[in-house]
Amino acid sequence: MFIKVLGTAQDAGIPHPNCFCDHCEAAKKDKKYQRSAASLSIHFETENKWYMIDPSPDFKQQLQHVQSDMGWKQMMDGILLTHAHIGHYPGLMFLGKEAISTKEMPVMAGGEMNHFLSSHYPWKQLIDFNNIKLKLIENQKAISFPEGACIIPLSVPHRNEFSETFGFMIQGKQKSLLYIPDIDSWEEWEQDLGQRMKDIDYCIIDGTFYSTVELEWIGRSYKDIPHPLMTKSMEKFEPYKDTCNIYFTHFNHTNPVIGTDQRYQEEVEANGFFILEEGQEIHL
């Protein structure tokens, strides 16, 4: 069993639409600076099955990468959704009759997300035409997967305008991974972080912003789009970095760790943390 990284950017990807900042300009000129919206795939080679966490706006390219890299000419066996922000579910549109036209693709989501999808078009059409079949997942209730693996949804505080927000604890036969691409702040999370981190081998967490300075560059307020700053998260996760490999993901286009200036990425790595890269595989 292994996890494959399909995307590491905040919702709109990099380059960001209608942006001409140094990071986006570099990404337009050089593909190595481009990043797709955050998404993971989970692979079970023995049973020839795979699943996707968050069908992003870059779903089409991400699906192609999985199929070409693995040599698997098949759709995923199911989809898990974290929440209803635009970087995390619009790829569902490709499952409809205008495109792939899947048959009862299992889509695992919380109760509020299920209500959102079943109450609003065009998403409701996917249900009406049996392209997808919604499956309810609940906070801290384990979901069984092939090869003895399980995934445990964990409710996290986020701007829940349309749905709840989940992170996922992914437990393989040998190792475990905690995936939280979006959270407002670690202090608001009701989990005991020390207790939760005891048995975690890999951690992939929200790295949307490095500091408040970058938001000032684009004239936006941190209060409007709260995420834990990477500088603060490194302080919060400092006690766990020796026993857990901690990666940042979900980078906003303003974040200097994904730009051409290597000083910021080097600083993160010097502190014992890592920048998640697309195409990376983590074996569990």
Image: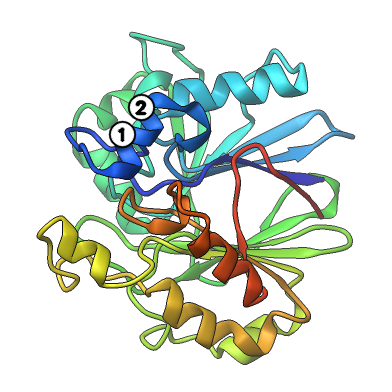
Question: Is 191 above or below relative to 41?
Answer: below
Is residue 186 in sight in this rendering? Answer: yes
Res 256 quadrant in image: bottom left
- Residue 159 can be seen, yes or no: no
- The residue at 60%/46% (across/down) is 277
Location of mark 1 (residue)? 25
Residue name at image x 59 percent, y 40 percent: 278
Of residues 144 and 251, which is closer to you in this image? 251
Instruction: Tell me which amino acid carries mark 2.
Output: Lys
Give yes or no for contact between labels 1 and 2 (Cβ–Cβ under 8 Å).
yes
SS state under label 2 = helix
Q: Residue at x 49, y 17 (%)?
A: 102
Q: Amino acid at mark 1?
A: Glu
Q: Which of the pair 249/62 is nearer the observer?
A: 249
- Place of residue 69 in the rendered image (x, y in percent of width and height, measured from the top left): 72, 22
Does residue 279 appear to the left or right of 193 in the view shown? Answer: right
Query: Residue extending furthest left?
Result: 219
Q: Nearer the viewer, residue 186 or 141?
A: 186
Q: Which residue is under mark 2?
A: 28
